[in-house]
Image: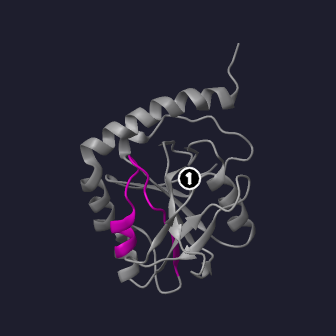
Amino acid sequence: MTSSPALLKQTLRREALQLRRGESARLGVAASLALAARADALEVGPQTIVGGYWPLPGEVDPRPLMATLAARGASLALPMVTAPDAPLIFRAWCPGDPLESGPHGTFHPAAAAPLLSPTLVLVPLLAFDAKGFRLGFGGGYYDRTLDALRRGGGVVAAGLAFAAQQSPALPSEPWDQPLDMVFTEEGLLTVVRA
């Protein structure tokens, strides 16, 4: 008897969360700085709007990378949850801007901050594979968001992870939105789709 993708994902989430905690304790700040030092791997310019995230405990901290990309002319935005089954929205953010607390332990810019549509989304994750599939917490926020952004035009989805978070293969379901690339402390993995 085979497990459904949803049940398999639940088991993998527990294992991946534990692995990520260990990698964060071992590499945390060094990994975040390594991403910033390799920012040239990401093509950004004055027209780029980077949708980052405020890190939860254990996630790769994107803030050093975001600061480097902003210094190269990119605009920054952070996501905001508006409803449990809705895509995330992104509001303009600059380092030092005040943040408000959101659901699930997140932080986002104030409602007065302008809405932006990212052209590059930095995506947190628990695990990833070479096909670009990722395992998140299961809320579907990034799948809905990437689907909406892809329907609205061009967007690049870059997962941020510790290299050890790579899995040989992850289960996928029809609504799962694959990443275009994954950026780790060891470098950039570009996804090649068949």
**Identity of the residue drawn at 32% across and 41% down:** 23
Residue nearer the viewer, 102 or 146: 102
- 61 is within the stretch colored magenta: yes
The vertical placement of 100 against 177, above or below, is below
Number of marks: 1
Q: Quadrant of residue 114?
A: bottom right
**Identity of the residue drawn at 71% across and 58% down:** 83
Query: Which region shows up in magenta?
Result: 48-67
- 69 is within the stretch colored magenta: no
Q: Quadrant of residue 134?
A: top right
In which quadrant is the N terminus drawn? Answer: top right
Q: How is the image coloured?
A: one colour
The vertical placement of 25 against 105, above or below, is above
Measuring from the top left, give residue 86's x and y in whole percent.
73, 58
Residue nearer the viewer, 83 or 133: 83
Measuring from the top left, give residue 160's x and y in whole percent.
44, 55
Measuring from the top left, give residue 85's x and y in whole percent.
74, 53
Measuring from the top left, give residue 70's x and y in whole percent.
40, 79
Relative to 146, 56 lies left or right? left
Residue nearer the viewer, 153 or 191: 153
For the view shown, which residue lies furthest in the top direction? 1
Q: Which residue is mark 1?
A: 192
- Magenta highlight: main SS: loop
Neighbour tally class for label 1: few under 14, some 14-19, many 20 plus, Cα within 10 Å: few
Under circle 1, the secondary element is loop
**Identity of the residue drawn at 28% across and 67% down:** 37
The vertical placement of 48 against 32, above or below, is below
The vertical placement of 84 against 78, above or below, is above
**Identity of the residue drawn at 71% across and 40% down:** 173
Dot 1 amino acid type: Val
